[in-house]
C-alpha cells in the first residue's frame, strides 16, 4: 500500500512538472 501511494505521488509530481513547463511555454 505504501509503495502504491509513492507511485501515485510520483505520478502527480511529474504531472505538475509537465503542467508547469506547458504554462511557462518551454514545450
Image (cartoon, grey):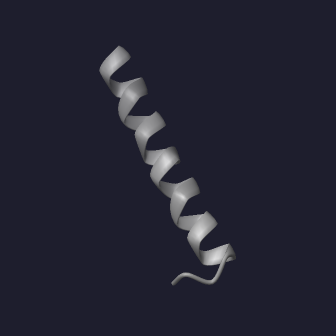
The front one of 13 and 24 is 24
Q: Confirm whether residue 1 shows in the render.
A: no
Circle count: 0
- The furthest residue to the left: 3
Q: Relative to 10, is 14 above or below?
A: below
Q: Relative to 13, is 8 above or below?
A: above
Q: Is residue 18 left or right of residue 2?
A: right
Q: Relative to 6, is 13 above or below?
A: below
Q: Quadrant of the N terminus?
A: top left
Q: Is residue 19 left or right of residue 3?
A: right
Q: Position of residue 21 (x, y in %)?
A: 57, 71
Q: Confirm whether residue 7 shows in the render.
A: yes
Q: Position of residue 11 (x, y in %)?
A: 43, 46
Q: Relative to 10, is 22 above or below?
A: below
Q: Quadrant of residue 4?
A: top left
Q: Residue at x 51, y 84 (%)?
A: 27
Q: Is residue 2 left or right of residue 27?
A: left
- The furthest residue to the right: 23
Q: Position of residue 14 (x, y in %)?
A: 46, 53
Q: Residue at x 55, y 81 (%)?
A: 26
Q: Residue at x 39, y 27 (%)?
A: 6
Q: Residue at x 51, y 57 (%)?
A: 15
Amino acid at each position: 500500500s505504501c509503495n502504491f501511494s509513492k507511485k501515485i505521488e510520483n505520478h502527480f509530481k511529474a504531472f505538475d512538472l509537465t503542467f508547469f513547463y506547458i504554462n511557462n511555454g518551454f514545450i
